[in-house]
Image (cartoon, grey):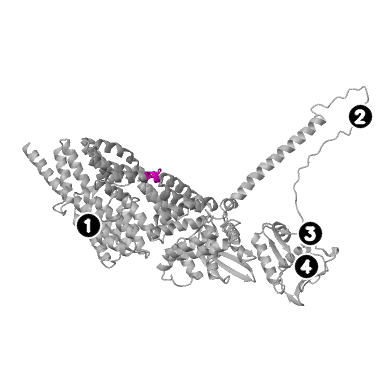
């Protein structure tokens, strides 16, 4: 490239001396590199119009392909050099969506001869179709002209040339199209997971600084190629490193990167000149610190920062190796063009900061502010729903979730998946639709741990335990510093009857410094399942030193219920409920108490169960409350509440396949209509493998309906899969039911063995427990009949 001119250009006390390649201000030389000076000259020479970014890229770098960020950097350097004048006039203007314009008034216009001349070369491939012309002499009149053998008439030769050229052109077009498609799909590396650091430098507003990082996190998170470790996971890892309260240096970030199985650290910087900014992000390997890629963005004002973050994220994704097609497909701006996005972003960022620290009330108010600034801020509604859930406001949670779902078209594909997943589980309760959505989410975003964890949860709810194990393993692999991921996997593994794997998973959690009440509590379940007394004593000792957790009381209450120690169950659940109430979780305490009501009445302690039930506040949204109504004799109230629940959740999987049949069957059994109970329970087989409640209840209904053979089959199904409920009263009651079914068929020896199993499991049961008294009497009758025979 060459610039040929000897003129001088003056504007705003600046002077460009073309002959000397010098920019000065009031005779003070200003240093510019050659490329930045070339940019200035080109903008000056075309001051009569807006110069597009593509035109500048082609002009300044005619023989190479460079990123737009290179141009952005030179614009920033040029503006920095042209920032000394006092008039406040913007010399280099950005025209959004078009390019840049030299806006200063030129005092001495340059002569036409002095205009910049750019020499460039280009190579153009052309296909030339030549027409053959017959230049032979015209044949004498009257003589016959004979064409040579095998020659082609001129007209046909012309047609062949055109046809051949057309074929060649078509082949080149097809080849070009396929080549273009490969170019769009080409990625330069494997998908990466990154740690995002705080910005180095400041805008002058700490909230805005944090907001920009949050905006970049949201933008990058929509990529199926680049995965950003969630801020909560980073904070958890820093806590394990005992550096939660220290600034995150690059060395610390690299250690977090390694601990979370990530590949790169993203370190950002912000530089400010007047109202303008230069944003940069650099990705470096967490193994050796080598630079993987970098992106830069020039921003002309504070108000444009959120939109320029979008562009920075796209450039960074390409630098990290993501294909152009993927970037084009998964690039949704954080805000639409007509919103007060900066204020919305700042409020949203402050809310996220408070939410991460458990300040739910403050977070809710800030999210409301963000939504006021941007009514289409679907992500803010989504987070608002989360905070309402944590604060116990179920109705507000549903309303916010519905709004997020209605606005899902405004957000990226990744956030859409998250919104639809929660909408299906929370608002409609359609777990089959949730499973389909989550499977699509994991297919498009295979490195998203949340997607895999949610899929595992839904699969577990649907009774697909082995699939849930696989999904949970993938989630843990992607988020190895999250305690909940270990516990979730251990639960799935135990329910899949692999207690050894479950113990190994919990051991790994403790080895990583992720010990806690959830881990220890589930150890207790495994210990009970394996009848490992030493392991159980270890967990009881641990719980004695950590008395603020309700989980251990709940687990010990479950054990008491499974062994028929009903008085102990009530006492332990009372302690758990008291702890929940002190922690502000009264609704959880009440729901657990309603479960106790059901257990008491089922075990024959009707008076105690009814007294406890009537002491609790009504909650028609809690299915345990509706079941309690049915158990305490208010059948009409239970059915009315059930119909209201079905109307609210017409597609609700658990409502229609679990709770409705369960409640109706109990009402039919209480009304001595066992055959109706059998019929209403038939659809529940779709959830077999979820738990032991349904097959146990089906066994009871078949037995009451006089079908002991079918009852036997259901009870044996319960006993074949005890791992689904490692601590459960359904196991001993299934042995009792099996004994009754076999006795009804006249199979006394196996019936006696079944009764013995029950009596062994309830060896420490309360003496006045109804099932214990019934079993002893029935067992004695069986033995007497056997001896008489």
600 relative to 53 in the view: left or right: left
Q: Residue at x 79, y 59 (%)?
A: 119
Dot label at residue 119: 3
Q: Residue at x 48, y 47 (%)?
A: 440
Mark sitting earlier along the chain (1/3): 3
Residue 697 point in image, percent of width and height: 26, 43
100 relative to 154 in the view: left or right: left
Residue 299 point in image, percent of width and height: 63, 65
Mark sitting earlier along the chain (1/4): 4
C-alpha separation, residue under disc 1 versus residue under disc 4? 86 Å
Question: Which is more toward the observer, 551 or 163?
Answer: 551
Q: Would you say the residues marked 3 and 4 are in contact, meaning their CB atoms lie under 8 Å apart? A: no
Mark 2 or 3: the one toward you: 3
| Mark 1, other Cα within 10 Å: few <14 / some 14–19 / many ≥20 | many
| Mark 2, other Cα within 10 Å: few <14 / some 14–19 / many ≥20 | few
C-alpha separation, residue under disc 2 versus residue under disc 3? 51 Å
747 relative to 624 in the view: left or right: left
Mark sitting earlier along the chain (4/2): 4
Mark sitting earlier along the chain (2/3): 3
Residue 335 falls within the magenta-colored stretch: no
C-alpha separation, residue under disc 3 versus residue under disc 4? 28 Å
Q: Would you say the residues marked 1 and 4 are in contact, meaning their CB atoms lie under 8 Å apart? A: no
Dot label at residue 160: none
The residue labelled by disc 1 is 570
Residue 249 point in image, percent of width and height: 50, 71
Mark sitting earlier along the chain (2/1): 2
The residue labelled by disc 2 is 138
C-alpha separation, residue under disc 1 versus residue under disc 3? 91 Å
Residue 581 point in image, percent of width and height: 31, 62
The residue labelled by disc 4 is 105
């Amino acid at each position: 490239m060459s610039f040929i001119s000897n003129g001088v250009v003056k504007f705003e006390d600046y002077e460009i001396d073309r002959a000397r390649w010098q920019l000065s201000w009031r005779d003070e030389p200003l240093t510019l590199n050659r490329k930045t000076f070339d940019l200035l000259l080109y903008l000056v020479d075309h001051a009569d119009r807006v110069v597009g970014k593509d035109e500048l890229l082609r002009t300044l770098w005619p023989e190479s392909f460079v990123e737009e960020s290179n141009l952005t950097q030179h614009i920033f350097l040029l503006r920095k050099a042209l920032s000394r004048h006092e008039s406040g006039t913007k010399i280099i203007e950005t025209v959004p969506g078009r390019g840049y314009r030299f806006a200063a008034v030129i005092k001495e216009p340059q002569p036409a001869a002095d205009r910049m001349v750019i020499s460039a070369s280009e190579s153009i491939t052309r296909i030339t179709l030549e027409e053959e012309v017959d230049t032979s002499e015209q044949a004498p009149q009257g003589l016959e002209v004979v064409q040579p053998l095998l020659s082609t008439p001129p007209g046909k030769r012309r047609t062949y040339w055109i046809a051949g050229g057309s074929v060649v052109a078509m082949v080149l077009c097809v080849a070009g199209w396929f080549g273009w498609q490969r170019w769009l799909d080409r990625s330069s590396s494997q998908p990466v997971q990154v740690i995002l650091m705080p910005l180095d430098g400041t805008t002058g507003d700490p909230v805005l600084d944090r907001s920009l990082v949050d905006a970049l996190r949201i933008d990058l998170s929509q990529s199926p190629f680049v995965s950003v470790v969630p801020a909560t996971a980073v904070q958890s890892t820093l806590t394990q490193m005992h550096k939660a309260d220290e600034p995150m240096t690059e060395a610390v970030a690299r250690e977090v990167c390694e601990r979370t199985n990530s590949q790169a650290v993203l370190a950002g910087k912000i530089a400010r000149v007047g109202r303008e900014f230069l944003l940069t992000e650099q990705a470096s390997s967490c193994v050796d610190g080598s630079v993987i890629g970098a992106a830069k963005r020039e921003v002309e004002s504070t108000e444009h920062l959120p939109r320029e973050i979008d562009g920075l994220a796209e450039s960074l994704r390409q630098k990290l190796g993501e294909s152009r097609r993927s970037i084009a497909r998964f690039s949704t701006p954080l805000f639409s063009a007509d919103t007060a996005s900066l204020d919305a972003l700042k409020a949203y960022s402050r809310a996220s900061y408070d939410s991460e620290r458990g300040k739910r009330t403050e977070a809710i108010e800030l999210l409301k502010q963000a939504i006021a600034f941007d009514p289409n801020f679907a992500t803010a509604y989504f987070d608002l729903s989360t905070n309402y859930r944590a604060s116990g406001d179920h109705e507000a949670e549903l309303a916010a979730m519905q709004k997020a779902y209605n606005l899902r078209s405004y957000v990226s594909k990744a956030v859409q998946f998250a919104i639809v997943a929660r909408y299906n589980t929370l608002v409609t309760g359609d777990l089959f639709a949730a499973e389909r959505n989550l499977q699509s989410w994991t297919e498009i975003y295979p490195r998203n741990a949340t997607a895999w964890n949610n899929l595992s949860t839904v699969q577990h709810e649907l009774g697909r335990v082995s699939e849930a194990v696989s999904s949970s393993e993938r989630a843990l692999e992607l988020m190895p510093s999250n305690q909940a991921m270990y516990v979730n996997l251990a639960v799935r593994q135990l329910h899949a009857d692999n207690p050894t794997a479950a113990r190994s998973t919990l051991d790994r959690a403790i080895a990583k410094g992720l010990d806690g009440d959830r881990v220890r509590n589930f150890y207790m379940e495994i210990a009970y399942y394996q009848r490992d007394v030493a392991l159980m004593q270890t967990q009881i000792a641990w719980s004695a030193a950590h008395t603020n957790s309700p989980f251990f009381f709940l687990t010990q209450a479950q054990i008491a219920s499974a062994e028929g120690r009903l008085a102990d169950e009530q006492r332990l659940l009372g302690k758990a409920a008291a702890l929940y109430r002190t922690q502000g979780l009264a609704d959880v305490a009440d729901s657990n108490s309603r479960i106790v009501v059901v257990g008491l009445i089922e075990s024959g302690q009707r008076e105690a169960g009814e007294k406890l039930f009537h002491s609790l506040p009504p909650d028609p949204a809690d299915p345990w409350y509706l079941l309690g109504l049915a158990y305490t004799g208010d059948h009409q109230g239970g059915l009315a509440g059930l119909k209201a629940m079905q109307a609210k959740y017409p597609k609700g999987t658990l409502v229609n396949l679990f709770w409705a049949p369960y409640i109706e069957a109990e009402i039919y059994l209480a009304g001595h209509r066992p055959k109706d109970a059998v019929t209403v329970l038939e659809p529940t087989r779709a959830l077999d493998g979820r738990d032991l409640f349904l097959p146990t209840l089906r066994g009871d209904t078949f037995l009451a309906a006089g079908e002991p053979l079918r009852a036997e089959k259901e009870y044996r199904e319960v006993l074949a899969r005890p791992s689904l409920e490692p601590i459960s009263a359904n196991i001993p009651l299934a042995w009792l039911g099996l004994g009754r079914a076999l006795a009804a068929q006249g199979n006394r020896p196996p019936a006696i063995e079944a009764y013995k199993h029950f009596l062994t499991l309830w060896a420490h049961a309360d003496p006045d427990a109804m099932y214990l008294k019934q079993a002893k009497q029935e067992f004695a009758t069986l033995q007497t009949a056997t001896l008489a025979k």
